[in-house]
Image (cartoon, helix red, strand yellow):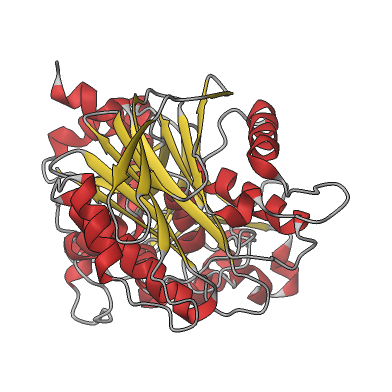
Amino acid sequence: MLSIEKAEKMFVEISCSQENKHGHIVCGDAFLSRMIDGENRYVAVLSDGLGSGVKANVLSTMTASMALNFRLRHEPIERTAITIMNTLPTDSVRNISYSTFSIVDIENEGDTAVMEYDNPDFVFIRNNKNCEITKEVIEIKSPDKPKKIRLSKLKMFKGDRLIIYSDGVNQSGIGLNQYPFGWEREGLIEFVEETIAENPEISARDLSKTIIRRAYLNDQYKAKDDTSCAVIYMREPRKLLICSGPPYNEQKDKYLADIVASYPGKKIICGGTTSMIISRELNREISMDIDVPMVDLPPVSEMEGVDLITEGILTLGAVAQSLDKSIIIDNKSKSPEDLIIKLIQESDVIDIMVGTRINVAHQDPNLPVELEIRRNVIKKIADILEEKYLKKVELKFI
Amino acid sequence: MDKKIIVKICVGTYCYVMGGYELKDLKSKLPSHLVDKVKVEASVCLGCDKSAKPIPPYAEIDGELMEAASIEKITKKIESLIR
């Protein structure tokens, strides 16, 4: 199999939303996920700690991080579970140590193992419908009563979704006339199927948010328990191309323009000279509206077939700064750096083409020192996107 | 005179930093008798990298490139073109 084609095939989007129990400032559930680049592997863990508040948060965070690290080292599930149970501190009131977990381990493009201990059964959606998976039950000896771990193995394909959640979700609304026993797993499944039917491409991020919002509503905006929901969605990666800088060799101008023209995804050009080159090679005009209020950065311009054109190094510097400080951008903002960040956030795979020709004009010593070298700024952006935002970034220098 | 004089202002990095930022207000700073005769546009780059020793900011008035442009200089140029 072609490795490049394989890597392009599927993207695993993992996203979790949470709501704290009413009146608590921390969530008693913990969710951790990690992508291991070299192994093409993803591990996600959701844990619900006994009780609520800080104590529960400590229990669940310990459980989740232990489970994650044991899985990463391929430790057998029995040993993982026993170690967790032996390590957790004992609750002084209830005199037990307890937390639940669901571990999802995805390898080799979809070979998935799910291990659940006392969390509600996960929901698996294929072809936009719920599918029940047969589970194997493993008993683990423990001093009080044997603990049961449910183990499922399945192969996930493109379009599949796996949903793990804490009992705050299926028990939401409990006691109301409408839900005497809570929303229950059936209610959740029905809701998820309806949501996906309305919006078949809904991202993991939006779906988990929608589910939590609904559970919150079931509880009449006062969550009765810590409520968490994580969605794992196997999908076609949403791709974004960012071009900045003229190619070192002018003969490559055409090559760069062809990449922009044929790229399967969204496109951004950052830089005046770069956009002039692409405009010339593709014979497409650039238009700019000068009447929009300019704030700190030169205005954006437009070209047929390109989603966004901005100025280069100043704008990229602002983008790097915003990303580094995790500034939450206003969806309605029209400033060039926010427009770039919005496109980045909506993408999974980001290809960056960096032109390396030195712009003679930029060597003027009168220029402010903030004008950094393009390569450095872009390297910084790429590092932040990979580490902090779990994006797949591919840098290419021409 | 029916045809408007087209003034292009460079908002590329170099020009923008070296004074192009002020040129964007050109339209509001023109004397009132000139306002209707001029169309102000922005350009992503007017080609400063082609010159060996560029003096920014650049502007282009009716196809003619102007180095070290300022609102004053552009106004004078437009006046001379109208006459």
Q: Position of residue A15 (x, y in %)?
A: 45, 50
Q: Quadrant of the C terminus of chain A?
A: top left
Camera sees residue A234? yes
Residue A198 sits in quarter: top right
Residue B59 sits in quarter: bottom left
Q: Position of residue A87 (x, y in %)?
A: 25, 70
- Residue positioned 88% across, 50% down in the render: A177
- Residue positioned 62% across, 67% down in the render: A293
Camera sees residue A241? no
Asked whether A206 or A304 is in front, the reply is: A206
Q: Is residue A263 left or right of residue A200?
A: left
Q: Position of residue A344 (x, y in %)?
A: 42, 51
- Residue positioned 36% across, 26% down in the render: A156
Asked whether B20 or A200 is in front, the reply is: A200
Q: Position of residue A204 (x, y in %)?
A: 50, 42
**Is residue A368 placed above or below A334 in the rendered structure?**
below
